[in-house]
Amino acid sequence: MNFKSTGIAAAFLAIAASANAQEIELPDVIAWSAYDTGSAGHAHSIAIGNMMRSKYGSTVRVLPGRNDVSRMTPLKNGTVDYCLCGIASYFAAEGVFLFAAPEWGPQPIRAVLQAVGDYGLGVAVAADAGIETIADLKGKRVARAVSSPAIGNNMEGLLAFGDLTWDDVETVEFSGYVNSLKGILENRVDAAFALTTTTVNYQIESSPRGLKWLETPADQDEAWQRYTSVTPFVTPHMVSVGPAIDPDSPLPMALYPYPLLVTETDQNTSEVRNIVAALDAGFDDYKDAAPGANAYAIDRQILSWVMPWSDGSVAYFKEKGLWTPEAQANQDKLVERQEVLLQAWNAFVDGAPEGEEEFAPAWMEARAAALEEAGHEVFFR
């Protein structure tokens, strides 16, 4: 079934009589892909969906996906218009990792709304494993989610914080994010990358193994330089939400917006504006309905980040008086970056190597050259 055809295009911006208010008109059905059942992203989708249905009569239809490709594919092929995704949406926009493939390439991804919360991200370890620091992961069993560049890249960055690589640990592969965390429960691994509020973490905490978080203190400059050279989208963060974390004694860890509600460049501007407006107006109705759902507050948005915003989101930020010249300058730079990547891709694919093993390295080389020539930073070489 193509959810896109069930009424999404019917949304429009209704100008109210009052100059200070605009009516929010939403489609009968809003379809988006999201993380699998048991994840924070799925729980947020349900909480937001309940608000949308009760307040606006709009049904949010959620397609759960176990890995990055299964979440991004419905957006690419038009089955859904939105994805409540993780950082893989940024990787897709950049055309890297799994998206450095003939059927992908850089995608026209735009942010709709970010979740910027009190939770964080880092390495979850079994408390019985005797692991105190990231450097202690050397020789330990570490989960790696197959077909999930987001999880893999985050774990690789965290290993770099401890001056380690995948070669320094015993890698155990899993089909997806939630299953990688269940590996701790099943005593198949000692450590895995995790968002602190993911539901499975509460199960780990109450299990015989117990749960511990490894810290990444902001004052360890060299370690953070190694970390951000691998994962440029993370920032230091004092984390106060999640199992095995005392709210009165936050842990020094990391953060990036998660989940990210994203769409494509050509998505209807008025529809996006209305969805953002509804998420803002209905915030009190869902902010406490799932752990971390308060992170979608409009005043928490990181306006200058690594992904450009949808024009509809920008329109709403301007209405609220949040948009700044600095945000506009960053937006212009990122939009230009997307155009550079698209032009580089179009020029590359015409004469690209046909072999699967040769394609990605050749694209990454062409990508880096195009970005450097245009004066943009190159990550993920």
Image (spheres, rainbow, N blue to C red):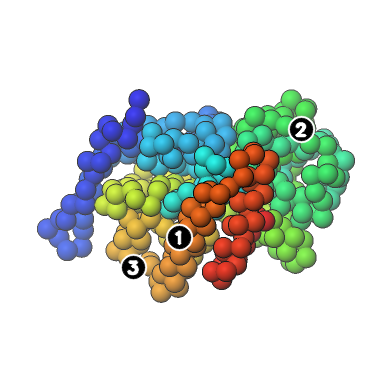
Q: Is mark 2 on a helix, strand or loop?
A: strand
Judging by the rendered image, the residue that carries numbered circle 3 is 321
Amino acid under disc 3: Gly
Nearer to us in this view, 290 or 277: 277
* Residue at 67%, 35% in the rendered image: 145
Q: Is mark 3 on a helix, strand or loop?
A: loop
Q: Pinpoint residue 280: horizontal percent, then vertical percent.
A: 35, 52
Q: In which quarter of the image is the C terminus?
A: bottom right
- Quadrant location of residue 208? top right
Nearer to us in this view, 268 or 358: 358
* Residue at 77%, 50% in the rendered image: 159
Judging by the rendered image, the residue that carries numbered circle 2 is 172
Nearer to us in this view, 267 or 317: 267
Q: Which mark is residue 339?
A: 1
Q: Is residue 258 left or right of residue 247?
A: left
Q: Distance between the residues labelled 1 and 3?
A: 28 Å
Q: Is mark 1 on a helix, strand or loop?
A: helix
